[in-house]
Amino acid sequence: MMNDEYRKAITQAKANLEDARERGAEALMSWDEIEAKYFTPEEIAASNLRVQLMTKLAHTQDDSDISQHELASKA
């Protein structure tokens, strides 16, 4: 049994999907557009730094052939 809040969310999601279908490509934004609209330069820089760090850790783990647990304990 769905509660009213869930039912409203489903109705809104369906309306959003129909709107996106009607507007086509105009309804879509690129990630760069989303970043520029919703995030400050500082938030973008912090996010980029986290991605770089996670990428470096993943490559280090792969290159070292160690488990994620081992890498965490060394970090």
Image (tube, rainbow, N blue to C red):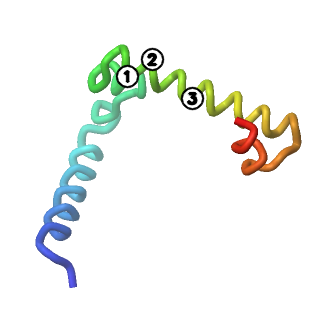
Percent coordinates x, y for residue 48 in the rendering: 51, 22
Q: Residues within 10 Å of mark 3 (few under 14, many from 20)?
A: few
Residue corresponding to mark 2: 45
Residue at image coords 22%, 50%: 16
Where does residue 62 sit, x and y in percent of width and height? 82, 39
Report the residue marked by disc 3: 51
Identify the residue position indicated by label 1 in the image: 43
Tell me the quarter of the picture where residue 75 sits.
top right
| Label 1, label 2: how far apart the Cα atoms are | 5 Å
Q: Is residue 4 left or right of residue 61?
A: left
The disc placed on residue 75 is: none
From the top left corner, tell me how far across and down residue 38 is, in percent: 28, 26
| Nearer to me, 42 or 73 | 73
Percent coordinates x, y for residue 61 in the rendering: 79, 39
Query: Sequence-wise, which precedes: disc 1 or disc 3?
Result: 1
| Residue at x-position 73% and y-position 51% | 69
* Furthest residue toward top: 41
